[in-house]
């Protein structure tokens, strides 16, 4: 199976998962209306795991403005994205499964790093 065949094979599950999620951005919380529509963001990019990137543990549903922000790995490292995943979609948060997408899973993101981002982002939301 090549990358395009893989993409087609997971399309239905990706869209079903997106449709099961609340119809608002997991980051900013705004509803999807008008010029704000839902986009599926893969925490681990397709280019890094072309035949293994789609698992529900690897997805975030973001509005199009927020999605463009997530391309900056300095602002949104994997641990921070996974902290958001754990908070907004705990049913599908699975660090062990997510690590299996990575080439060297045991050396990548730890629960401690995710906790640090959770605490930091919670404090910044509380201070708004």
Image (tube, rainbow, N blue to C red):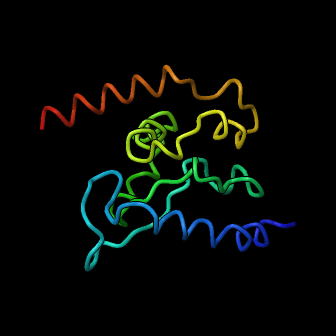
Q: Please tell me whether residue 23 is drawn above or below residue 54 in the rendered image.
A: below
Residue drawn 74% across and 53% down?
A: 52
Q: Residue 96 location, x and y as percent? A: 65, 33
Residue at horizontal 26 percent and vertical 76 percent from the top? 33
In the figure, residue 24 lies in which quadrant?
Answer: bottom left
Residue at 78% from the left image edge and 66% from the top image edge = 3
Identity of the residue drawn at 30% across and 33% down: 121
Q: Residue furthest left?
A: 128
Question: What is the x, y in percent for residue 12?
Answer: 63, 73
Q: Which is more toward the observer, 88 or 44? A: 88
Residue 95, given in percent of the width and then of the height, sits at 59, 34
Q: What quarter of the picture does the C terminus occupy?
A: top left
Horizontally, residue 55 falls left or right of residue 15, namely right
> Is 92 left, or right, of 11 in this rendering?
left
Q: Is residue 106 left or right of residue 81?
A: right
Q: Quadrant of residue 32?
A: bottom left
């Amino acid at each position: 199976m090549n990358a395009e065949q893989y993409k087609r094979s997971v399309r239905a599950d990706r869209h079903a998962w997106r449709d099961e999620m609340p119809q608002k951005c997991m980051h900013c919380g705004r509803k999807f209306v008008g010029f704000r529509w839902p986009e599926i963001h893969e925490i681990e990019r397709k280019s890094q795991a072309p035949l293994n990137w789609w698992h529900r543990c690897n997805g975030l549903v973001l509005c199009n403005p927020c999605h463009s922000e997530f391309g900056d790995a300095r602002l949104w490292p994997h641990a921070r994205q996974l902290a958001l995943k754990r908070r907004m979609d705990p049913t599908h948060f699975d660090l062990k499964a997510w690590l299996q997408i990575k080439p060297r899973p045991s050396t990548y993101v730890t629960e401690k790093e995710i906790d640090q981002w959770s605490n930091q982002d919670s404090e910044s939301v509380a201070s708004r």
